[in-house]
Image (cartoon, helix red, strand yellow):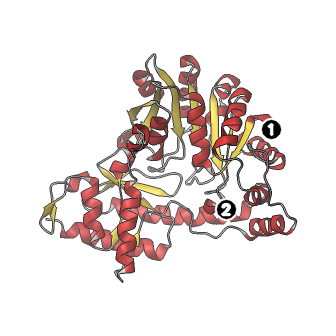
Amino acid sequence: MEATKRVKNIAPSLTLEITAKAKKMKAEGISVIGFGAGEPDFNTPDYINEAAKKAIDIGFTKYTPASGMPELKKAVCAKFKKDNDLDYTEDQIVISSGAKSSLYHAIEAIVEEGDEVLLPSPYWLTYPELIALAGGRTVYVPAAKEQGYKVTADDLRRAATAKTKALIFNSPNNPTGAVYTKEEIAAIAKFVEESGIYVISDEIYEKLVYGGAKHYSIAQFGEKVKEQTIVVNGVSKTYSMTGWRIGYLAAPKNIAKAIGSMQSHTASNPCSIAQYATVAALSGGEDFIEKMNKTFDERRRYMYKRLCGMKGVACAEPQGAFYAFADVSALYGKSFEGETIETSMQFASAALKKGVALIPGVAFGDDKSVRLSYAISMEDIKEGLDRMERFIDELK
């Protein structure tokens, strides 16, 4: 029996490969500091947990409408108005089993076989795989470190063709931590309006911004671009609810209706208990978010300073999410235990031998770099960076 070509061609996750190696080492009693975390190291707030318990107690454990329970859609509309000054109606909202599910359904809804999708690079590794599953072709638009890992409207214009159907836009960005300014997004919004393409705007790290940076949704920049935009968000990062699997999107009514219909066949509906808890989540949490941001910011500043002080390492200052993206290509050509390092995968594999797990940048479209998460304790960050520095000092 053979799997289909579209499934066989999906690339395995390099992040999981490094993580699996690190877990194996830990199981063998070897000390490893892992910088691969893609989720906040905070517990879900108690008021959200209590809402989930209430959902169980009152028997809210049955099917909901495929596109989400009305109370949650209403809460999401209120969130968009409050946080982004965006007006949506409930028939424009689709609740999904995580933001990744929202992205999958959004791409399936707008990308036809052979369509091109613009993707700024570095990028989150799942985007190209979802584009390929829909039969589309990813057109990578490089964002240089010297530009803060951000593309410009002119970069996108040069990459666009008659086959361009959409742009995937992610700010704050995974893996680089880049946050686009109001002026930069306004220029990209103008390009989108002029070209008539769709935008899928992944705003999952919306609340995690630092150092005076501010998040703007591209859908805020006029009614025309809003009608061309699918905004994807969720509660996993903001409220430390990664395991609850609730994402949501806002889209033009015809697209939202199509996505809701598709979801009724692919996933039925998101978990009723998690939806009930998410209504509570969106009603508060300001103190929790502020505390989490303050902690992340402290770690961010420390990690950035340490990385910039390491021999052969260059790093653009991250302004959002909880990642730093370090260029280690100046160290390529050096050897460790007799093996010459020429790629980010080789660098990460060698560093793992010294007890520090880094995510190779090739997974994100940049083989010069490695990604480090600061969603781990400050104690582990300090020890992990010490190990990374000792590893670099041992390169010959």
Name the foreground residue: 262 vs 144: 262
Name the foreground residue: 329 vs 186: 329
* Residue sticking out furthest to the bottom: 29
The image shows residue 297 at horizontal and vertical percentages of 54, 62
In this view of the protein, can residue 202 be seen by the observer?
no
The image shows residue 282 at horizontal and vertical percentages of 76, 54
Element at badge 1? helix
Badge 2 crowding class, 10 Å Cα cut-off, few under 14, some 14 to 19, many 20 or more, is few
The image shows residue 24 at horizontal and vertical percentages of 36, 73
Q: Are marks 1 and 2 in contact (CB under 8 Å)?
A: no
Q: Residue tagged by mark 2?
A: 290
Query: In the figure, is residue 260 to the left or right of 376?
Result: right
* Residue sticking out furthest to the right: 58
Q: Amino acid at mark 2?
A: Glu
Q: In terms of image quadrants, where is residue 309?
A: bottom left
In this view of the protein, can residue 171 be seen by the observer?
yes
Residue 90 - label? 1
Q: Is residue 353 above or below residue 30?
A: above
